[in-house]
Amino acid sequence: MVVQVPGLASPWEEPASIADLALVAGAADQLGYDFLTCSEHVAIPGAEVASRGAVYWDPLATLGYLAAHTTSIRLATSVLVLGYHHPLEIAKRYGTLDKVSSGRLILGVGIGSLAAEFELLGATWSGRGARADDALRALRASLSSPSPAYDGPFYSYSDMTLLPHAVQPRVPIWVGGRTLRSLHRAVELADGWAPFGLDPGTIEHLLTRVEVPDDFQVVLGTGCPLEPEADADGTRRRLAELRAVGATVVGCSVSARSAQHYCEQLHLLHDIAATID
């Protein structure tokens, strides 16, 4: 609902209300799902709307609202574009989200893929990968500290006070992307990898190219909405396939006719997932 990509979003999502969002989030929370996600785009160039969609709710406002309507489910940005923000800006805003949610933040980040959006915001497109690496190091040094200090090639600061800050001693950071470099970035500087737009075979191949730590998260999406009610066997096969290629966590969306039906689908998906060895 908060991201409406053509071909993936159900028709009911376009006119959906904030009450619908709270209903779905509450159901996922009560069922014990791991996390909710929200992506970041400030403005979509007209030429990209047909492929990327036009609806992107702001992640900070959205996840802050959902923090107040849930109790245990984690709140994941999927993803923030590092080049749009100073690391201390992220540390303050999302550290505050971590505090108000009692330590439920997962910080998903990426280097960005829309040159026109970078230009619009006055952000630097060229060399954004190196800047992102520096930003990740700065974030790790700053997210949970009241007195952050960092000295890198692009970001440098000291003698600063950051209150409030994240309450988790180590906020989980997941790196999005679809390249081997993004996987290396995730292994070296973060806690998980959340690839997009890749088939399971490619993901499995990339994971063989890198030594992945034992506690590292591989966060794979289903690629298309699941249909637990209409196709329970297909849903089970898809989840099992993702697990087989290395997923430790699966980000799911489901087809539905309404917010209430979405909640019903979540119940069925929960039961199906419990049967996978």
Image (cartoon, rainbow, N blue to C red):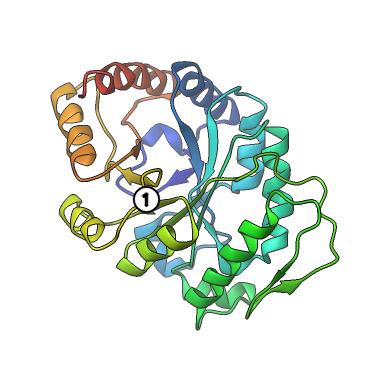
For the C terminus, the quadrant is: top left
Report the label total.
1
Q: Position of residue 9 (x, y in %)?
A: 36, 41
Q: Nearer the viewer, residue 146 or 252?
A: 146
State whether residue 269 is above or below residue 86: above
State whether residue 137 is above or below residue 155: above
At x 15%, y 31%, the residue is 237
At x 80%, y 51%, the residue is 146
Q: Is residue 163 left or right of residue 219?
A: right
At x 14%, y 24%, the residue is 233
Q: Is residue 184 left or right of residue 67?
A: left
Which quadrant holds residue 230? top left
Q: Position of residue 106 (x, y in %)?
A: 54, 43
Residue that protrudes farthest toward the bottom in the picture: 126
Classify 10 Å Cα crowding around label 1: few (below 14), some (14-19), many (20 and above): few
Q: Nearer the viewer, residue 116 or 14?
A: 116
Q: Position of residue 93 (x, y in %)?
A: 72, 50
Q: Position of residue 128 (x, y in %)?
A: 51, 76
Secondary element at image label 1: loop
Kindly identify which residue carries mark 1. 213
Q: Nearer the viewer, residue 210 or 58?
A: 210
Q: Nearer the viewer, residue 175 or 15?
A: 175
Q: Is residue 128 left or right of residue 248?
A: right
At x 51%, y 32%, the residue is 16
Q: Is residue 166 left or right of residue 170?
A: right
Name the residue type under label 1: Pro
